[in-house]
Image: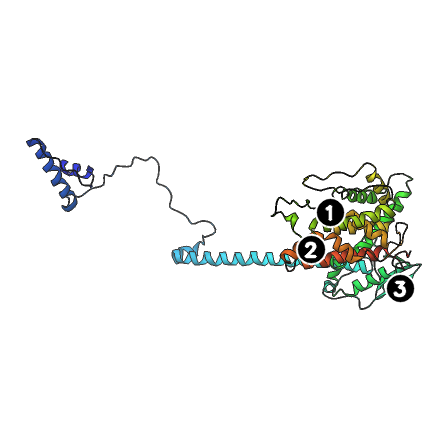
Amino acid sequence: MAPATRLCLALPLRPTPVVAPSSKVAAAIFSSSASCRRAAIHTPLTQPLRAKVEPSHGNGPPPPAPVPAAEFADGAAAADEGYAGYSRVARRKRQAEMLRQARDIRNAASAHAKDKSAAAAEAAANIGGVGRGTATAAAQLKRRFWKDVVVREVDGFYQVFLDSRPLRRPNATKDILTIPLTKPHLANALALEWDQLLSAQEAAKQHLIPLMSLTCRALDIADDDAAHSLKNTVDPAPIRASIVTSLLRYLDTDSLLCWAPPADPSDRLSASNATNKEGKSLRDLQKETALSIVSYLTARVWPGISIVPVLEGESLLPRQQEPGTREVVQGWVLGLSSWELAGLERATLAGKSLLGGARLVVEWSEGDAGVGYGGQFGVEEAARAASVETEWQTRKWGEVEDTHDVEKEDVRRQFGSVVLLVSGRGMGNAQ
C-alpha cells in the first residue's frame, strides 16, 4: 500500500479546519491532505488487500474426526442414511424415551393415589367400626358405607351408630365414642353431623366434623386425667397442664381488654373521634362489651379479684393483671371437668378471649363450673363480643365477600359447638 494511502486511512473523516498557508511547504501539505481525503473516499485502491497467512508449526498427529454423541449414534443406520437418517432415528429414540418416562411417572402417581385412598378408607372404616382396619375397597371413599345414623343408649351411655356399627374415636385403641346420658343434645347433633356427610372421604376432613373432633378432645382429656390419677401425683395431667398454660397467655392479651385510644378533641381527623348513629365511638362499644362480661365473672365466678384493661390509651405494650388475679384464674381453669375444659379451649381460640369463653362456659355448663343460665349470654352475644372491631369497620367500609361473611358464620358455629358440649339435659343449670 502506498504511503499516501496509509496516511489517508489514518486520518479522521470529519472536516479539517482550513488554515491559511504561510509558506510554500504549508501549502503543499494542505493540498496533499485534501487530495488524500478525496482519494480515500472516492478513489478505489490500486492494490487489493491480502491476508497474511502464517505457517503452522504444530507437533503430533492431526486431531481425530468429530464423532456424534452416544445418544445420537446409530451405527449402520447413520452410515447408510447419512446425517439426515441418524437425526431422524435419534429423534424417534428421544420421543420413545420421553413416552417411557411419562408412562412411569403416571404409573407411580396412580399407585400413590391408590395407596392414599386405601389408607383413608381404612381410617374412615375404623371410625365407623368396620372390623378395626379391614376396609379393602377404595370405592368406599366415593360413597357412604352407611345408610342410617341413629342414637342408642348402651351400657349407660349414648352411642352413635352408622347402621349397625358404633362410631369410634380416631385414637390408637379405636374406642367406641360414648356420651353421658345427661347430654342428649350433643349425641343427636353428632348423629346429624354424620348424617350430612356424602362420602366416607368427607369423614377424614376435620372441618366437616367439628363436633366430632371437639367431643373426642374432651374424651382424650378425661382418659389422660384418669391415667394420671393412678400415679398419685399432685401435678395436673399433661394434656390438662398444656391447655391451662396456653389459655393463661390470653389473660394478659385478651381481645376484650384491648381498647382503642380515647378521643382527642384537638385532632379532628383522628379515628377515635368517629361515632356511629347512636353517638358511640369504637372505644365506647369496646368498654361497654368488656365491662358487662368482666362484672359478671368477678361477681359470680372469681369474686374478690380485679380485672383491668391490658391496652389502653396510647400505650403500645400490654400490661399484666394485678397480683393474685392470674393465680385465681389458673386455679379455676385447673378445676374444670374435661368437657368444660375442652369447651373453654374451643371458645377461647374462636374468640381470642379467655374472658368471653369463660362467660359462655359458666352460663351453659351442667357441671360444677356452671352458675346457671339466665338467657343473657348465648351464641349471638358471644359472637358480637368477639367481633366488635370487625363490625365497626364493616359498617363503615363494607364487607368483603367470602371473607367477613364466612368468618361471621364460622365464629357462631364454633360457639354453638361449645354450648352443645358443655350443656346438659336442661341446657344449663336453671336459677
**Nearest-to-viewer mark from 2 and 3:** 2
Q: Residues within 10 Å of mark 3 (few under 14, many from 20)?
A: some
* Residue 15 in which image quadrant: top left
> Quadrant of the image for the C terminus?
bottom right
Above or below residue 300? Residue 20 is: above
Most foreground residue, 300 or 151 = 300
- Report x, y in % for residue 138: 72, 62
Q: Residue furthest bottom?
A: 147
How far separated are the C-alphas under marks 2 and 3? 43 Å
Residue 122's tag is none
List the residue tagged with mark 3: 152
CB under 8 Å between callouts 3 and 1? no
Q: Residue furthest front?
A: 265
Most foreground residue, 243 or 281 = 281
Most foreground residue, 404 or 270 = 270
Task: Describe the element under mark 2 as helix, strand or loop.
Answer: helix
Q: Disc 3 marks which amino acid?
A: Arg
Q: Earlier in the sequence, mark 3 or mark 1?
A: 3
* Residue 334 in which image quadrant: top right
> Quadrant of the image for the N terminus?
top left
Q: Disc 1 marks which amino acid?
A: Ser
- Report x, y in % for residue 110: 64, 59
List the residue tagged with mark 2: 391
Task: Describe the element under mark 1 as helix, strand or loop.
Answer: helix
How far separated are the C-alphas under marks 3 and 1? 42 Å
Res 428 seen here: yes
Q: Earlier in the sequence, mark 2 or mark 3?
A: 3
List the residue tagged with mark 1: 255
